[in-house]
Image: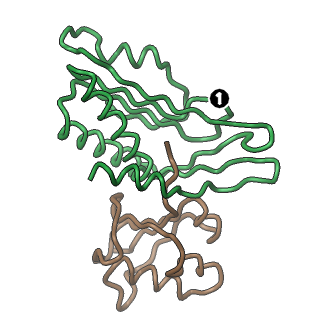
Chain colours: A green, B brown
């Protein structure tokens, strides 16, 4: 399964290694790792809510679209939900391809689309209380450049 | 078949519920009309007003307000997504 939505942490090294395990035709693997960025005076924890079912389906569609756009040999997407603390891993995207160009582009494409299409919502705990994170216009712009 | 309606994140909190079922209301044939029907309940349902940034999905796919409903669908309303 190339897409996982889970509460548990994941092993970046193992996930990256699995993309090329048993193969000799892969020339490049690009990975992205997203972390909870915290600060004492701002974010102390974050809770990610999602839409079970639609989340997995939308991520799978994004991966399928990436395969249609580039010559890819393997894709792995993991996104966590639940309560996470600063420094914890949130999301992993790994892309294997013959050459680095495709791997870099597809990895960025998947993250840009994930940010605007996958039904996740972040709620931050700050010293002033908990609040839902507002969507950012820059994320829509980042996704739009692939259209 | 009843519609299954889901609410997520800040919208779920504002409405005080995450889910409900109801028959396709009279005169409602699109996602936008369903939203207007729910909005007309008043009070907390103002959160579904036209000026609010609300997205929708039908049967777990992103939907537009003119997408049609026939009854029996799973419809979700939620704020713009903020994952990643």
Please report, as a chain letter, where disc 1 is located: A
User: Quick check: A74 left or right of A85?
Assistant: left
Looking at the image, which is closer to me, B18 or B9?
A: B9
Image vertical order of residue A125 relative to residue B39, above or below: above
Looking at the image, can residue A1 be seen?
A: no
Looking at the image, which is closer to me, A77 or B7?
A: A77
- Name which residue lies at 29% across and 27% down: A103
User: Quick check: B46 left or right of A119?
Assistant: right
Residue for badge 1: A87
Image vertical order of residue A16 relative to residue B49, above or below: above
Secondary structure at badge 1 equals: loop
> Residue B84: where, in percent of width, then height?
49, 42
> Residue B9: where, in percent of width, then height?
58, 59
Image vertical order of residue A20 relative to residue B13, above or below: above
> Residue B38: where, in percent of width, then height?
50, 82
User: Quick check: A88 left or right of A54?
Assistant: right
Dot 1: within a 10 Å radius of its alpha carbon, few (fewer than 14), some, or many (20 or more) residues? few
Looking at the image, which is closer to me, A64 or B58?
A: A64
Quadrant in which the N terminus of chain A appears: top left
How many marks the image carries: the answer is 1
- Name which residue lies at 72% across and 42% down: A43
- Name which residue lies at 61% across and 62% down: B10
User: Quick check: A33 left or right of A104?
Assistant: right
Q: Quadrant of residue A7?
A: top right
Looking at the image, can residue A11 be seen?
A: yes
> Residue B14: where, in percent of width, then height?
64, 69
């Amino acid at each position: 399964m190339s897409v996982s939505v889970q509460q548990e942490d994941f092993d970046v090294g193992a996930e990256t290694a699995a993309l090329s395990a048993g193969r000799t035709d892969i020339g490049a693997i690009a990975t992205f790792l997203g972390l909870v960025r915290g600060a004492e005076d701002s974010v102390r924890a974050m809770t990610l809510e999602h839409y079970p079912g639609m989340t997995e389906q939308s991520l799978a569609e994004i991966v399928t679209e990436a395969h249609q756009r580039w010559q890819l040999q393997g894709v792995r997407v993991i996104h966590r939900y639940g309560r996470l603390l600063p420094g914890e891993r949130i999301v992993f995207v790994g892309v294997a391809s013959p050459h680095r160009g495709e791997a870099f582009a597809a990895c960025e494409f998947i993250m840009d689309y994930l940010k605007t299409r996958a039904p996740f919502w972040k709620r931050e705990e700050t010293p002033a209380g908990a609040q839902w994170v507002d969507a950012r216009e820059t994320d829509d712009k980042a996704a739009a450049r692939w259209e | 078949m009843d519609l299954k309606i889901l609410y997520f994140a800040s919208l779920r909190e504002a409405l005080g519920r995450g889910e409900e079922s109801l028959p396709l209301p009279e005169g409602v044939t699109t996602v936008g009309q369903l939203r207007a029907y729910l909005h007309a309940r008043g009070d907390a349902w103002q959160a579904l007003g036209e000026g609010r940034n609300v997205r929708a999905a039908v049967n777990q796919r992103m939907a537009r307000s003119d997408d049609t409903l026939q009854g029996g669908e799973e419809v979700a309303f939620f704020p713009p997504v903020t994952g990643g």
